[in-house]
């Protein structure tokens, strides 16, 4: 199945000021949480992968 | 090719805008470069010439880097500009603007903002920030950014392009 892509269609972005210290802090916390979640998911995937039977 | 082989093909559409912009009249694609702007470029990127933002002022901000998008082998004509700031864990996109002749229904080239946003993600990966990019959105454009960039509506007017969305944009605009 093919997914139809839509193209970004704006003439400009931004011009509404800079991030406040508080906003920056909240973004940092969010990004940290996202990173942690990805790491946990990675560990879960690794753990659930089938083990190879070792023949002595 | 057998029927079975056809079914295992790629599951997405790669459009014509990969690392290029498209002439909306002829449909021709042109490869692009994105490099730091020079003070000589600022003579043409003025409000008087139809640019919306004060790029001279943006250029003066020490913590921000302004890049220009041009067609390969034609670096004097600026097709679009982007202003970026490297934060501690992501890249903040201050401004993006298409050249006056690339705006609205009469634009000459399409794909400029998409290429510039993908470049911001690329820079974020290069700086070790895992592709994370943030920017402010107008309320009415939040859904458009979700649909076209895969951005997350973080809160209020803040949008975030996370690693997954950044990777998709990079694969679309800067394929290896």
Image (tube, coloured by chain):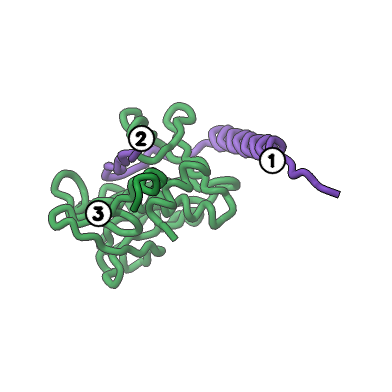
Chain colours: A purple, B green
- Cα distance, mark 1 to mark 3? 48 Å
Do labels 1 and 3 touch, CB within 8 Å?
A: no
Residue A30 appears at what percent x and percent y?
Answer: 58, 33
SS under mark 3? loop
Q: Which of pointers 2 and 3 lies earlier in the amino acid sequence?
A: 3
Pointer 2: residues within 10 angstroms few (<14), some, or many (20+)? some
Closer to viewer: mark 2 or mark 3 = 2
Q: Mark 2 highlights which residue? A: B147
Q: Residue at x 39, y 59 (%)?
A: B67
Relative vertical location of residue A44 with respect to residue B110 in this rendering, above or below:
above
Q: Residue at x 24, y 60 (%)?
A: B29
Front in this rendered view, residue B110 or B138: B110
Tell me which chain the residue with mark 2 is part of.
B
Quadrant occupied by the C terminus of chain B: bottom left
Residue A8 appears at what percent x and percent y?
Answer: 31, 43
Residue extending furthest toward the bottom: B73
- Mark 2 vs mark 1: tell me if same chain: no
Identify the mark at residue B99; answer none if there is no mark.
3
Residue B49 visible? The answer is no
Q: Residue at x 47, y 50 (%)?
A: B121
The quadrant where residue B81 appears = bottom left
Residue A47 appears at what percent x and percent y?
Answer: 72, 37
Q: Mark 1 highlights which residue? A: A46
SS under mark 2? helix
Give the side of residue B32 with respect to residue A52, left or right: left
Identify the mark at residue B109; answer none if there is no mark.
none
Residue B146 appears at what percent x and percent y?
Answer: 39, 34
Tell me which chain the residue with mark 1 is part of.
A
Do labels 2 and 1 touch, CB within 8 Å?
A: no
Do labels 2 and 3 touch, CB within 8 Å?
A: no
Closer to viewer: mark 1 or mark 3 = 1
């Amino acid at each position: 199945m093919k997914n139809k892509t839509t193209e970004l269609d704006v003439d400009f972005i931004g011009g509404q000021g800079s991030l406040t210290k508080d906003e920056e802090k909240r973004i940092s916390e969010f990004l940290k949480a996202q990173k942690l979640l990805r790491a946990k998911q990675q560990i879960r995937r690794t753990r659930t992968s089938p083990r190879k039977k070792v023949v002595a | 090719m057998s029927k079975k082989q056809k079914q295992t093909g790629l599951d997405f559409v790669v459009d014509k805008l990969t690392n290029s912009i498209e002439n909306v009249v002829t449909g021709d694609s042109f490869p692009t470069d994105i490099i730091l702007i020079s003070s000589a470029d600022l003579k043409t990127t003025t409000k008087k010439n139809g640019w919306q933002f004060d790029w001279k002022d943006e250029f003066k901000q020490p913590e921000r880097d302004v890049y220009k998008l041009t067609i390969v082998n034609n670096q004097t004509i600026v097709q679009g500009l982007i202003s970026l700031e490297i934060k501690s864990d992501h890249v903040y996109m201050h401004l993006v603007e298409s050249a006056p002749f690339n705006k609205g229904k009469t634009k000459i080239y399409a794909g400029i903002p998409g290429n510039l946003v993908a470049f911001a993600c690329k820079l974020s990966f290069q700086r070790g920030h895992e592709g994370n990019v943030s920017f402010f959105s107008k309320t009415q454009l939040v859904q458009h950014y979700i649909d076209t960039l895969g951005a997350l509506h973080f809160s209020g007017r803040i949008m975030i392009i996370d690693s997954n969305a950044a990777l998709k944009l990079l694969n679309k605009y800067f394929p290896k």
